[in-house]
Amino acid sequence: METQRSSPVLKILVALLGIGILSLGYYTYDMYNESKETEQILQQEKEQVINELEDLKVNYDQALQEKTEVSNKFEEAKARIESLIEEVKKQKKVTAGVIHKYKREIAALKAQRDKLYKLADSLRTANMQLITENDSLNTNLEQQKQFNDTLLNKNEQLSQTISRAKVLYPTEIVAQGVKIKSSGKVVETSKYKRATDIRVCFTVPKNDIIESGNQTFYVSITNPEGEVIGSQQEITIDGDHSVIISGSEDIIYENKAFKVCIFVKPNDKEREITKGKYRVMLYHNGHKVGETGFELESGLF
């Protein structure tokens, strides 16, 4: 009787055990499928992470090609991206935590990229402003240089004008041969054989700019043979040019017009006083101030 009563219980237990095994198998199968699906999703997210990193790398490459003012920062970020790409590719076991970590890295790199772009734009704007200011400064300096050059030129012209204003330019210049007698009397002559001296007379003009006092006039007389007759002293004119003079005359200038004569006696009358045309040049204060000419003829009378 006991055996008959236990048989149904056993059957029930076996049935329950079977149901449990079937449920466990279904649950295990379901968990396996879910794990596979999760792994597939994680792999897809891994590929997405790699793609985003590759895109970021392209962004940084473009930034470097533009030769921005913060290229060294872009270089550092690019190196970090390349390192992350290799790191992600080597990950064999991908978890949600790993994906989350790399996504944080990507977000940080994007934020850094945007910040660097803004910084580069700011620096570029500042550089352009500096270039503009520098160009403006160069323009001002060039204008100032031109102004200074003009002013210097005007000062030089003024200096030359003042220098010329301090020069006496004689008028009524007359040169001729003369014979000075033993008595001191001076007789004009146009005959070269009778002439003992050459006399050059001129009128000194009034000039209020020149201070009163001693002034010296020089005369250079060239005979028909091109020889300078007279003293043969040397003076400098126009700052750097030397001329041989025949004689000179010191006067006391009192800022009013008066007549002056310079007598030139030849060193060798037979050689220096000859027939022909003579050239006469006058100098004062380092400048040529006038010229004239005359002619001596042959004959005694």
Image: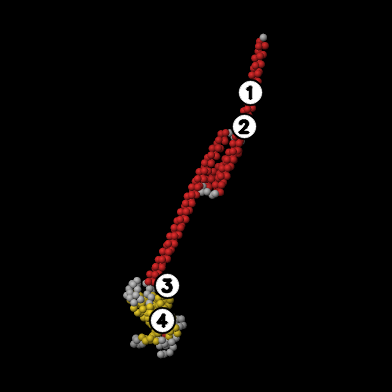
Kindly indicate whether the residue at mark 2 contacts the one at mark 4 (C-beta within 8 angstroms). Answer: no
Dot 1 corresponds to which residue?
Answer: 23
Q: Would you name the residue on which mark 2 appears?
A: 37
Along the polypeptide, which appears first: circle 2 or circle 3?
2
Mark 4 = which residue?
Answer: 230
Q: Position of residue 264 (x, y in %)?
A: 39, 82
Which image quarter: residue 152?
Answer: bottom left
Inspect the image, locate mark 2, and give the three-letter code of the amino acid beneath it: Glu
Q: Residue at label 3?
A: 238
The nearer-to-camera label among 4 and 1 is 1
The local secondary structure at tag 1 comes to helix
Q: Which amino acid does label 3 sit on?
A: Asp
Is residue 16 visible in the rendered image? The answer is yes
Amino acid at dot 1: Ser
Tell me which label, 4 or 1, sits earlier in the chain: 1
Q: Distance between the residues labelled 4 and 2?
A: 127 Å
The residue tagged with tag 3: helix, strand or loop? loop
**For this rendering, which residue is in front, 293 or 252?**
293
- The outermost residue toward the top is 1
Sort mark 1 into few (<14), some (14-19) or many (20+) by Cα contacts within 10 Å. Answer: few
Which mark is first along the chain, 3 or 4?
4
